[in-house]
């Protein structure tokens, strides 16, 4: 059973287009993180969302946490080739003492110049 | 900007040998973690460590695995007798506070067991 499902798994779009990737679960999370991972490297933290309904912006990237804290989305405006990479969502379950991050399967994004 | 560092970047070992993977977490962080990622698969939690003891571990983290903070800066993962299926990228992470979620990851050690 996948606790965190990301969709789509693969996305290839032209430079300048907008896109949204999704991270969904049936479980409630205390917080949810988005990471970007390059091949052979560690995940790099992009943002953390904590409050249901929270929206955070990082330049052309907009992150939203669902009202029920079970899902999240990442929207990229005017995608650029430098946005190419693997995007991972990861959350910590809303259980007492739970510290581990549960990772999604990732969305591999390719921006075509 | 402070970052988590890991050594070595790549370790090749024979089945049955012991390996020690090393990490230097961010200096003012108190919580430390190990994760692994088998090629093509998800990042998986192994263990969390706080105040010189394990606070949580996954079912992957069996008796072959151990962690230690031998001094004020290093955090190590030891695999006592490696198996072929231990081949993976191993990531160390650290965070300032528990349950904060903001875990910062190192660049990883690629472990290849032959």
Image (cartoon, rainbow, N blue to C red):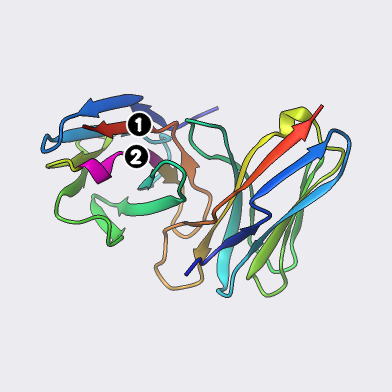
Q: Are marks 2 and 1 in contact (CB under 8 Å)?
A: yes
- Left or right of residue A78, residue B94 in this image: left
Instruction: For mark 2, give the secondary structure.
Output: strand
Viewer-nearest residue: A70 or A55? A70
> Compared to B59, does B24 lie above or below?
above
Report in which chain the residue with disc 1 lies.
Answer: B
Residue B22 on image: x %, y %: 28, 32
Residue that appears at 42% across and 60% down: A99
Viewer-nearest residue: A94 or A71? A71
Numbered mark located on residue B81 in the image:
none
Residue A88 on image: x %, y %: 59, 48
- Left or right of residue A56, residue B46 in this image: left
Residue that appears at 54% across and 53% down: A105
Viewer-nearest residue: B29 or A84? A84
Q: Quadrant of residue A69?
A: bottom right
Q: Quadrant of residue A110?
A: top right
User: How busy is the neighbourhood of tag 1: few (under 14 within 10 Å), some, or many (20 plus)?
Assistant: many
Distance (Cα) linking label 2 and label 1: 6 Å
**Magenta residues (range):** B84-92
Instruction: For mark 1, give the secondary structure.
Output: strand
Residue A17 on image: x %, y %: 88, 41
Q: Mark 2 vs mark 1: same chain?
A: yes
Numbered mark located on residue B88 in the image:
2
- Left or right of residue B2, residue A84 in this image: right
Residue that appears at 49% across and 47% down: B103
**Residue A112 part of the magenta-drawn span:** no
- Pointer 1 residue: B110
Residue that appears at 69% across and 41% down: A109
Q: Quadrant of residue A22?
A: bottom right
> Compared to B44, does B74 lie above or below?
above
């Amino acid at each position: 059973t996948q606790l965190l499902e990301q969709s789509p798994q693969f996305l290839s779009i032209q430079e300048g287009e907008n896109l949204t990737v999704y991270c969904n679960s049936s479980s409630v999370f205390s917080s949810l993180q988005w990471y970007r991972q390059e091949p052979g490297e560690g995940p790099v933290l992009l943002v953390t969302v904590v409050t249901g309904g929270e929206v955070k912006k990082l330049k052309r990237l907009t992150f939203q946490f669902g009202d029920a804290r079970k899902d999240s989305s990442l929207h990229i405006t005017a995608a650029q080739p430098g946005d190419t990479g693997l995007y991972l969502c990861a959350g910590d379950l809303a259980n007492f003492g739970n510290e581990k991050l549960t990772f999604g399967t990732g969305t591999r994004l390719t921006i075509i110049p | 900007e402070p970052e988590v560092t890991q050594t070595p970047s790549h370790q090749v070992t024979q089945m049955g040998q012991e390996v020690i993977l090393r990490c230097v977490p961010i200096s003012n962080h108190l919580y430390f973690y190990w994760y692994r990622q088998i090629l093509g698969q998800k990042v998986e939690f192994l263990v969390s460590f706080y105040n010189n003891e394990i606070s949580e571990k996954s079912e992957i983290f069996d008796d072959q695995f151990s962690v230690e903070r031998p001094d004020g800066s290093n955090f190590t993962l030891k695999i006592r007798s490696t198996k072929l299926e231990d081949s993976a990228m191993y990531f160390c992470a650290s965070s300032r506070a528990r349950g904060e979620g903001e875990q910062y990851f190192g660049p990883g050690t690629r472990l290849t067991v032959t």
